[in-house]
Image (cartoon, coloured by chain):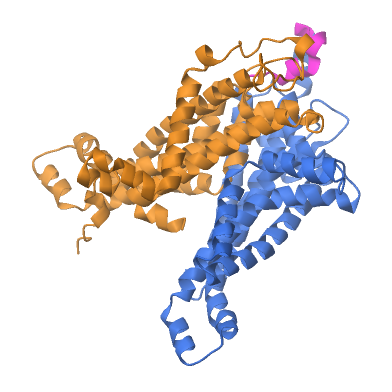
Amino acid sequence: MRPLTPAFATEPVLPRGVAARGPAALPRWARREWPAAAAAAFLALLVVLAAGAPWLAPYPYDRQDLDHALQGPERLHWLGTDQYGRDLLTRVLHGARISLTVGFAAVTAESVIGVAWGTLAGFYGGAADAALMRVVDLLIAFPSLLLAVLVTGIFGPSLVNIVAALTMTAWPAMARTVRSEVVALREREYIEAARAIGAGPGRLFRRHLVPNAMHLVAARATLDVSALVLTEATLSFIGIGVQPPRPSWGLMINESFQFLQSHPYLVIVPAAALSLTVIALNVLGEALAERLDPRLGGQRG
Amino acid sequence: MLRYLAYRVALTAPLLLGTALLIFLAGHYAPGDPVQVLLADHYTPEGAAHLRHELGLDRPLAAQFAGYIGRAARFDFGASYVNPARPVAEIVRQTLPVSLRLAALAVAAAALAGTALGVCAAVFERSAADRLIQLGVIAGLSVPSFVVAAVLVLLFALRWRLFPVAGWGHPSDYVLPVAVLAAAPLAYVTRISRASVRRALAEDYVRTARSKGLRRSAILARHVLRNAALPIVTTIGMAFGYAITGAFVVEVIFNIPGMARVAVDAILQRDYSVIQTAVLVYTAIFTFVNLAVDVSYAALNPRIRY
């Protein structure tokens, strides 16, 4: 028997109210799901600040001024300065830039690999599927931070290697999600019809299978960004992530940890920025997952 | 059941061998020449060639790998490149138990408190307590462990001076590291046990029990918890994963002589023999944890038969 068409597969990607009543319903959606709306607003602001950091920030991120080290907030330095007299506000803004760049680069890479891997496994089935998915099972069993530490440990810390390590931690789960969807899609009538008029595997992938799994990929990817940003910060905190003098939130916390007693704001400011970002990504991701992929949303309830 | 067990155990040997091959090849092709690191300022081409020969790095790759596996099987991992007086096996013997003890304490704390909080949240669903616990779960899963550590150190060690800032040896040294390690698994266990109990509470047999007049506590103990236990038990493996990886942060912050700190130091110093062994040890730990989780799942759930 053919599987029944799940209702969510044909639903529009936008929140239901918005799609039905046009953009005028956006405030209503924002009121009903205010945590997700607040998270989205915060993240939008953060992206603007991060993108504009080189122009918005009052100083270059590595400009030292040892005569004005460890100063509290004042007119010239709104958030004060660190132990080398570097402007804290500048470094937090540039830290956002690094964190988001690394996060988005890794989520793009892991999505591409995961979608390709999952589509191939799900479409061909049989021995190919078994072999491809054994690799996924193997990698998924490892905690992601451990995998990231080991990869950067073997290849050494650099921005490219950090992105590669983060990609390693996330793509297996993406592949598993996509595969399960493709296995269900493969049996659908329109795929059979496309095949009947002579569509090859390449065309089926590009035109039918991948586009129809896209809503799952979007939901999964949003949740993944928060995990990836968190892992980057942790790697940098341990000292095997982003290297000084480049600012990363994790690295800033590491460098200022010894001043926790005398100048706690040096730790609190980047820690708050990091925590708020990860929480916002989680809240938005779960709201999206509930909309776009009832299975993901339900699991996390 | 026995056949499944045999199959799962048989699977671990090729897995470990494959991992060993992978890290061996990666180490060979990775940037950063160990000989250069070892000689540092005393680098001369002749000295490098001599050391390369002494370490066996000039032999064919296959011979190097075979030798490596043969020695690893006898738990001989060679000497640390950076600190040649110390055999890597001895480093592991001294530091791994520290990490494992910390992880075990954290998992035990997280499992007990997490189950209690999760059951409480599910029983009093939609109450203020439930909402508070839910909020705590999101925070626990989102806030990085080094931020948790910073806050705890700031309050409990620096402000109120209840526990030491860092150090190792005294029992009070354990409190803050274990608390930091337990934070994320606690949130995770709470979330899973809340969902699991909630699902069990909605079952028909609970309604039957209630309609025949059984007291709430009896329903909870006899029907709900027993049926909700399975998913909770399997979270312990995951919690162990959080606790072992959290050690990379906690051991660095609190200056604890554990395996994770050894691994981080080795990575920073490119001490390749130690890095290689650490990767192997962690792979072995997680292979066995996953094996234990799978087998216990099969053993606990009568509906699963392999």
Residue B291: image location, x then y, percent = 59, 58
**Does the segment drawn in magenta span residue B34?**
yes
Segment tinted magenta in the rendering: B31-46
Residue B290 can be seen, yes or no: no
Which chain: blue? B
B179 in magenta: no
Q: Residue furthest right?
A: B170
Kindly report the secondary structure that dominates the magenta region of the rendered protein. Answer: helix
Residue B252 as seen in the image, left or right of residue A123: right
- The vertical placement of A72 against A60, above or below, is below
- Chain assigned orange: A
The furthest residue to the front? A75
Q: Quadrant of residue B219?
A: bottom right
Q: Where residue A226 sits in the image (x, y, percent)?
A: 51, 39
- Residue drawn at x 59%, y 45% is A143
Question: Does B286 appear above or below A273?
Answer: below
As displayed, is residue A280 above or below residue B184?
above
Point out residue A137 in the picture as x, y percentages from the top left corner.
48, 49
- Observer-nearest of B299 and A294: A294
In the image, is A290 to the left or to the right of A1? right
Q: Is residue B42 visible?
A: yes
Q: Nearer the viewer, residue B39 or B256?
A: B256
> What residue lies at 33% left-to-right and 48% top-to-bottom?
A292
